[in-house]
Amino acid sequence: MRTVYDVGGLDAADVHRAYAVIQHVMPGLDLEAWKTLTATVDARHDWLTVMDAHGYIRGLCYVFTREHPVRGSQMEVPIFASVSLVDKRGVARELFELAKSRARQAGVETIHFWSAGSANWESLMKLREAAPWDDGVMYDLRTDRTFLC
């Protein structure tokens, strides 16, 4: 039986729940900084979540679009975390499908999933400016295939 999840953007009511996940990915990020990063609807728009039936956030990712110097506009995913103990793959699958949906909405054809070591984890604000074009995995929405950067 497949577990049913609530997937979507980060709601204001779930910022504290999401902090329980993000602190595992970015241990140096304190709660006040997290609340600042997610204080507005626009800021939360780039955070995608997968929530279980009990209201726990089991998946969290950060997405945004930017221009690649050769490929053009693409979706960037510097943070992709599945934290379920019993259905890690299911949560990751839901989060991946949500990221693909957001990429299609943005009109991009590729998604760049960064490797864990490619980001400056000290500052989420600087993630949009960081440029690890040659690090991680690319997913092509047109062919449904992945390739290494």
Image (spheres, rainbow, N blue to C red):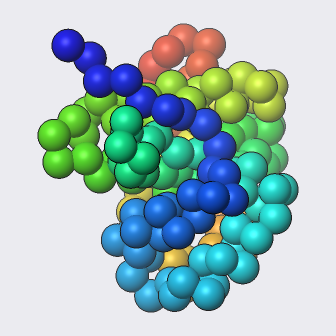
Q: Nearer the viewer, residue 57 or 67?
A: 57
How many discs mark residues in the rendered view?
A: 0
Q: Image point 46% across, 19% down: which residue?
A: 145
30 shown above or below 143: below
> Which corner quadrant of the image does residue 9 belong to?
top right
Q: Nearer the viewer, residue 108 or 15?
A: 15
> Which quadrant, please, contains the N terminus?
top left
The picture places residue 49, in percent across and down from the top left corner, at 52, 45
Judged from this view, the residue extending furthest toward the front is 54
Residue ID at (74%, 50%): 45
Residue 138 in the image: above or below residue 69:
above
Give percent across and percent down for residue 119.
Answer: 52, 70
149 versus 16 height, above or below: above
Instruction: Tell whether 126 sits left or right of 146.
Output: right
In this orientation, which residue lies closer to the viewer: 84 or 70? Answer: 84
Which residue is most to the left? 86
Q: Is residue 30 visible?
A: yes
Residue 94 locus on image (x, y percent): 43, 29
Depth order, front residue of 148/17? 17
Q: Position of residue 134 (x, y in %)?
A: 53, 53
Relative to 137, 82 lies left or right? left
Left or right position of 74 against 118: right
Q: Residue at x 70, y 73 (%)?
A: 37
Give the vertical position of 70 relative to 135 (above or below). above
User: Is residue 132 in view from this perspective?
Assistant: no
Residue 73: which quarter of the image?
Answer: top right
